[in-house]
Image: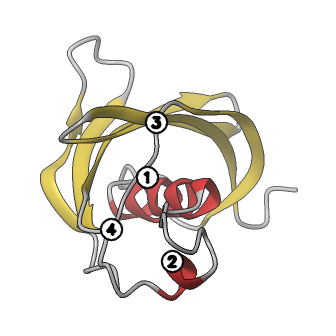
């Protein structure tokens, strides 16, 4: 199973002072149930599982004044390379306020390089 997501760079103001940035990592275990059928003989971690890890890591480093966030849209997802059993997934995350919404931009990578670029939008719970 994947290990727990660990924050390795706590959220802080980005250099441009308009966003919050942080970094998290998670180990992708060879015993993940998704590997049984994805794909037999050549296991690849499903892309949507990468997106889910970016989402969960993003919530861990969300700005303190952005409590109760609910994903309202996946704006862009680009898969760049596969993630294999035993890889460590590193997620560089950036939160930016846009009106009533928050945007999370995440870049996921392994030791082999970038594997995904994800951009999602969130609303505060109850702000519909």
Q: Which residue is mark 2?
A: 35
Q: Which residue is mark 4?
A: 85
Is the residue 39 above or below the residue 48 in the image? below
For label 3, count other residues whose C-alpha is less than 10 Å away and answer few (under 14), some (14-19) or many (20+): some
Q: Which residue is mark 1?
A: 65
Label 2 residue SS:
helix
Colour pattern of the rendering: secondary structure
Residue 73 at x, y percent in the picture = 78, 46
Q: Residue at x 46, y 53 (%)?
A: 54
* Label 3 or label 1, whichever comes before in sequence order: 1
Label 1 residue SS:
loop
Locate the N terminus and report the quarter of the image it occupies: bottom left
Q: Which sits in the foreground, 10 or 98?
A: 10
Q: Residue at x 74, y 43 (%)?
A: 74
Q: Are marks 2 and 4 in contact (CB under 8 Å)?
A: yes
Q: Which sits in the foreground, 41 or 63?
A: 41
Is the residue 109 above or below the residue 97 in the image? below
* Label 1 or label 2, whichever comes before in sequence order: 2
Q: Which residue is mark 3?
A: 81
Q: Are marks 1 and 2 in contact (CB under 8 Å)?
A: no
Q: Nearer the viewer, mark 1 or mark 4?
A: 4
Residue lying furthest right in this view? 128
Residue 92 at x, y percent in the picture = 30, 38
For label 1, count other residues whose C-alpha is less than 10 Å away and answer few (under 14), some (14-19) or many (20+): few
Q: Nearer the viewer, mark 3 or mark 1?
A: 3
Image-quadrant location for residue 101? top right
Q: Residue at x 51, y 77 (%)?
A: 35
């Amino acid at each position: 199973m994947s290990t727990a997501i660990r924050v390795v760079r706590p959220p802080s103001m980005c250099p441009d002072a308009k966003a919050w940035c942080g970094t998290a990592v998670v180990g992708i275990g060879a015993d993940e149930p998704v590997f049984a059928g994805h794909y037999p003989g050549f296991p690849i971690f499903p892309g949507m599982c990468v997106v889910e890890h970016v989402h969960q890591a993003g919530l861990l480093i969300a700005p303190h004044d952005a409590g109760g966030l609910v994903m309202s849209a996946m704006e862009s997802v680009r898969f760049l390379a596969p993630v294999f059993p035993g890889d460590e997934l590193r997620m560089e995350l950036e939160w930016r306020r846009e009106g009533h919404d928050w945007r999370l931009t995440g870049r996921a990578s392994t030791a082999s390089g970038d594997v995904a670029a994800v951009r999602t939008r969130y609303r505060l719970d109850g702000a519909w």
